[in-house]
Amino acid sequence: MFISDFAIKRPIITVTAMVALVVFGLVALINLETDEFPDVQQPVINVTIAYPGASPDTVEREIVEPIEDAIFSISGVDGKKTTSSSTDSLANFTVFFDFEKDIQEASQDIRDAISSKRADLPPEMEEPILTRFDPADQPIVSLVLTSTALDAPALTLIADPTVVGDLRSVPGVAQATVVGGVEREMTVQVRPAALQAAGLSVAQVVAALQAQNLAAPVGRLNSELQERTIRLKGRLETPEDFAQVPIAERNGRTLRLGEVADVFAGTEEPRTLSLYNGAQAVGIEIIKSKGYSTTEVADGVRERVKALQQRLPANARLEIVRDAGTRVEDSVVNVQEALVEGALLTVLVVFLFLNSWRSTVITGLALPVSVLASFVSVWAFGFTLNTMSLLGLTLAIGILIDDAIVVRENIVRHVEMGKDHYTAAREGTNEIGLAVAATTFSIVAVFVPVAFMYGVAGQWFKPFALTIAISVLVSLFVSFSLDPMLSAYWPDPQVEKGERRGFISRGLARFNHWFDRQADRYKGVIAWALDHRLAMVLLAVGSLVGAVALQGFFGGAGFVPVSDRAEIEMLVETPAGSSLDYTRRKVEEVSRLTRAHPEVAYTYTTIGVPLPLRSPGVDQALVYVRLKPKGEREASQEVLGKTLRDELRAVGGASVSVFTSGFGGAIKSIQLELRGPDSKGLNQVAQQVMKEVKQVPGAVDVGLSTRGEKPELVVELNRGVAGQLNVTVGMVAQSLRPAFAGLDSGDWVDPIGETRDVMVRLAPQFRENPSDLAQLPLVVGQGPTGAPVVVPLGQVAMVTQTVGPAQIDHLNREKVINVQANVAGRSLSEVMGDVQTRLAAVKMPPGYELSSGGESADQEEVFGRVFLALGVAVMLMYLILVIQFGSFLDPLAILMSLPLSLIGVVLALVITGDTLNIMSLIGVILLMGIVAKNAILLIDFAKWQHEKGMPLREALIEAGRIRLRPIIMTTFALIAGMVPVALGSGEGGDFRAPLGRAVIGGVITSTFLTLLVIPTVYEILSDGRTWMTRKLRKVFKGNTQGHGPVHGGGEPRPAPQARQD
């Protein structure tokens, strides 16, 4: 071969090329960012619009429906996934786009669409807030600021700006956000009785305050030599200043704000809350910038926290409660350790079979060169150093050394035949070259389609697949260059002399002699298999059928494996309409019961904070439970989660859902999407579906996305009376909104220079009972004396107590209710199978439709894309083999080996209790290339011997004997490389373990079946081809005269004695 011949003739160039690969790889490794998972870019925009004081149905009618019409007219919107929700005073949209859509263009399109509808939207609607949904924008570090003496407002003042401002200066920190803080404000609490006596409405108070509290430049004063700015000083600075603001003239005197309202420097009415171990705290969430490593930013934050602690008051403490940087670092280090351990075990296997430290070094050099060179491609493609790219290298360890093993073993065989080392290196490499190249390109053919899958699956798999593909191509280059060059110039004297010195060498020599005897015996096994071809075919078919049956009856399927990350999340939901104080009491009860378990280190709770797929509300809270390290507790994360789920059912007045997946995000695995035209009918059907789901074993935490109904007060104008008094709906709304929702009436600069809001609202004691609503004063005009006429709201309107939906959700512009559930004790596929069976008996009313979403839908989509990519990979592999063998029929024998690994995969997963999930599926992908590799080595050698004149059966038997050693060596090397992954130790090890176990199980069974079944299948195909050729010759006898035998046919043809590829 050109590469090997050139490498042998130009050793200095070869060494230089290898050193360059290593150096470039080290440079790339140093500059790579570190993260836990690949950066998945998905064009998703979240739109939040506040509509103060509006009920969910009002938000739906006046905000959501018009804006949905505008958004769905945008090109590239994925309507099947786009959702919206209407809650109290808030509309939320999650807009999905096709993957080809540019995210900046998508954002601008949404802004333009909303602007086009602005004239039809209520003027009280606040401006839309657009945020790009990015999985990488999740907090990487969560902090809590606590104190035994300071209250929440004081802690908030320390948190922002002191702590937050300092943390924002850490390189790589994009956002530092306060959670559960209580901001200061200038509070204006209006007294209804005083308003009525003064003949004023709340709206008039707000207007007067806004007119009197401002400062602005109004021009310049220019002289010949000087220019001076004129500034109007009207900003109010103290509560006393605000109290003196004139708001009206009554009976010849000025009525001031302090006469109708209490004015003081207070705090906002909290809608969020943070608790640390049950005590009130202020949380701080850190989000990193694009282009920065998670571990690097987290390290910087940890160092800054230590410095900040020294500057905080003595009774304040800043602690880290969640640290993705530590987890990512531990996980990456664990994969790196698995990579090194796998490499050492692989090299040990090589030494065991080759019994030569020089051969081991020559072969083992393929590993560091290939691994380091692959980092160049990771860097060039813009990937991070994450568990998927590192896992690709870990899995590839056994494959990377395969080519070197096969080449070196063949060179040693030629040396043992009596050739000098230079000739053996050249001819040994040439003899095996095309077969090795075909096996490598077959592996590349498996992973390239996987790397370029569409959607999230493609972005998730791309670093893994391309890393393996590039690394095996580098290993092929090393095997064709460095290995033959070193074999030629750095020979092993013991191999040439046939000597073995030392205790270990003699022991390994005896092992190799024993193995050679087994290889000779294997000739008899192949002969028997070839004599019982039907039995071998039945064995192959039976293994495939057995794998399918075993998976169907005993195996389960899920999306991602459960990983013990020493953390549990609990979603606590109180009845719709519950107050913040009520939710806090229930959450404290839940947290207290949780902390009673010795496995729990601490709890961190947030109330009223937005959650995935949910709008914020004070009736829901998320409890983060940090567990002690795995080595310091008896119960696993999953077991403790089950215990907590059972115990917390006793907590009355709240619903608790427990999430133990280990990947965060309080999103339930099962999401059944029920769509229909009517909210009441939808709710009735949803209740029926929920009842059925609750009967399924393994379905836990079953609930609905709507959160039920909440109490409402409906104000309905008496049109006759209101008309006589000239009271309009708009006038009532202008008085109600500032009185009960509160209205920001300007700015106030506090003593430390921070700008705060000025909030006008009724005092709390006048906003407690429905009767307070009827007492709200309305100014309806002037009397005969010119004095304002004031009437209570109850005189012109009726206030009725009723209930309304707490949340209204849309999917693809249709009303939707999600029936949600977690899975415990069974696999997702088993639970979903039983759910579908039970729901088949539920009759859907006309116009209503039920479909699956959530994790089960994600699993179906990703699995479907992977299987499609595998189908393309098999076609590419077939084309490569057609080129290699020069035959359309011979590759079919190779491809017959692919299903032979499935029985081992299923057996391994069933025995270890794992499911067929995204990680074990990666193992199946890897097996497709590995299994074909062994079959190629076997058939290629048999075909070559047959073309030299050896009868086909004898060629197959001889190929089995000669190729048994490299096949077993590469198999054991691959298994050795997988052992650290399969053991699942360390941070994130249990997440990766199903992959290693699937590969080991599949390799063992496929190797055994390949050595027996593939020679049989090849002989059957060859005999069939020979029979068909003879038949065709009889039919086209005249046309075939003068032509030689068909290439690759059953009859041997003369060939050169030395194979030169």
Image (tube, grey):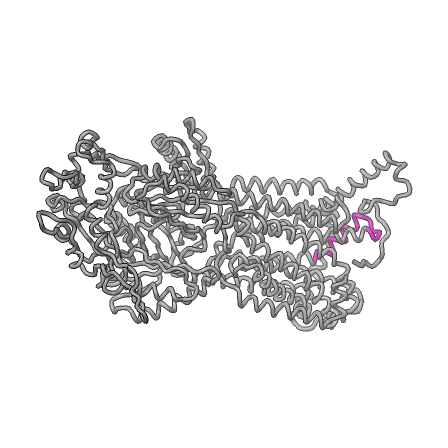
> In the rendered view of the protein, which quadrant contains the C terminus?
bottom right
What kind of secondary structure does the magenta stretch mostly adopt? helix
Left or right? Give the position of 93 relative to 1018. Answer: left
Quadrant of residue 773 within the rendered picture: top left
In this orientation, which residue lies closer to the viewer: 553 or 24? 24
Residue 914 is situated, as x and y percent measured from the top left of the image, at 50, 48
Residue at screen point 35% across, 38% down:
60
Residue 152 is situated, as x and y percent measured from the top left of the image, at 24, 58
Quadrant of residue 116 within the rendered picture: top left
Segment tinted magenta in the rendering: 947-965
Residue 761 higher or lower than 484, as above or below:
above
In this orientation, which residue lies closer to the viewer: 482 or 1001? 482
On whether residue 963 falls in the magenta region, the answer is: yes
Q: Spot the residue most to the front.
A: 224
Residue 1059 higher or lower than 684, as above or below:
below
Q: Is residue 655 visible?
A: no
> In the rendered view of the protein, which quadrant contains the N terminus?
bottom right
Q: How many marks?
A: 0
In this orientation, which residue lies closer to the viewer: 350 or 686? 686
Left or right? Give the position of 273 relative to 868. Answer: left
Q: Is residue 489 visible?
A: yes
Residue at screen point 28% across, 57% down:
181
Residue 220 is situated, as x and y percent measured from the top left of the image, at 30, 63
